[in-house]
Image (cartoon, helix red, strand yellow):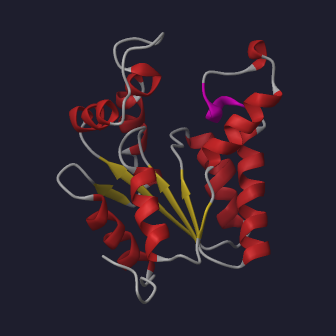
């Protein structure tokens, strides 16, 4: 089973997936952001795009890593990543589903002010992109795109703990915490 946790930058994807990984210690976390950084380390600055979703090689590399990890390790995979473009979503999540993978996709949402507060709390601040970093500038774009039905199942996070969101994902996927894990 692949559990893809999507949402705007700063909404709580990595925190939620961290809790899920603690609940199921035999699961693997596949982080497509690390694929993007690896790809960028191979490219000269002039060839890098503004974000991983726009890199032509990133979607197939990410999908290949997820496919191969699912095949080789036969265990639950948690994948935290913002994918807000429909074409990229189709290349990654859509293709995985077409190939017969069991993919549960969740989009974490919150209002823009909550997300910006979370970005500040994790240390995002002014940089070359402006008052709240590149991620902060993407909030409205990502919220608008990810609110569309294609990106459902939507889970509201503004007034909920990451633990509560993780518990809902466990419930919706039928996964159970491993014995001995602490809630």
**Vertical arrangement, residue 32 with respect to residue 44, above or below:** below
Q: Is residue 149 visible?
A: no
The quarter holding residue 23 reads bottom left
Asked whether, in this view, residue 116 is left or right of residue 15, the answer is: left
Extent of the magenta region: 51-55
**Vertical arrangement, residue 52 with respect to residue 82, above or below:** above
Q: Is residue 20 visible?
A: yes
Q: Quadrant of the C terminus?
A: bottom left
Q: Main secondary structure of the magenta part?
A: helix
Which residue lies at the image location 61% right of the left edge and 21% below the top edge?
A: 50
Picture coordinates of residue 132, whole percent (x, y)? 35, 20
**Vertical arrangement, residue 108 with respect to residue 36, above or below:** below
Which residue lies at the image location 54% right of the left edge and 43% below the top edge?
A: 83
Q: Is residue 91 magenta?
A: no
Picture coordinates of residue 44, whole percent (x, y)? 81, 18
Which residue lies at the image location 53% right of the left edge and 76% below the top edge?
A: 25
């Amino acid at each position: 089973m692949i559990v893809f946790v999507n949402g705007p930058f700063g909404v709580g994807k990595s925190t939620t997936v961290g809790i899920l990984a603690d609940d199921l210690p035999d699961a693997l976390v596949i982080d497509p952001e690390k694929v993007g950084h690896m790809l960028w380390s191979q490219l000269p600055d002039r060839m890098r795009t503004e974000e991983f979703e726009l890199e032509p090689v990133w979607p197939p590399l990410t999908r290949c890593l997820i496919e191969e990890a699912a095949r080789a390790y036969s265990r639950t995979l948690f994948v935290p990543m913002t994918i807000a473009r429909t074409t990229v979503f189709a290349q990654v999540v859509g293709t995985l589903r077409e190939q017969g993978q069991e993919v549960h996709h969740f989009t974490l949402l919150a209002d823009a002010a909550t997300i910006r507060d979370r970005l500040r709390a994790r240390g995002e601040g002014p940089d070359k992109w402006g008052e709240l970093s590149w991620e902060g500038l993407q909030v409205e774009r990502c919220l608008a795109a990810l609110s569309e039905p294609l990106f459902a199942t939507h889970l509201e996070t503004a007034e909920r703990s990451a633990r509560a969101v993780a518990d809902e994902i466990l419930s919706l996927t039928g996964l159970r915490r491993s014995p001995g894990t602490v809630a």
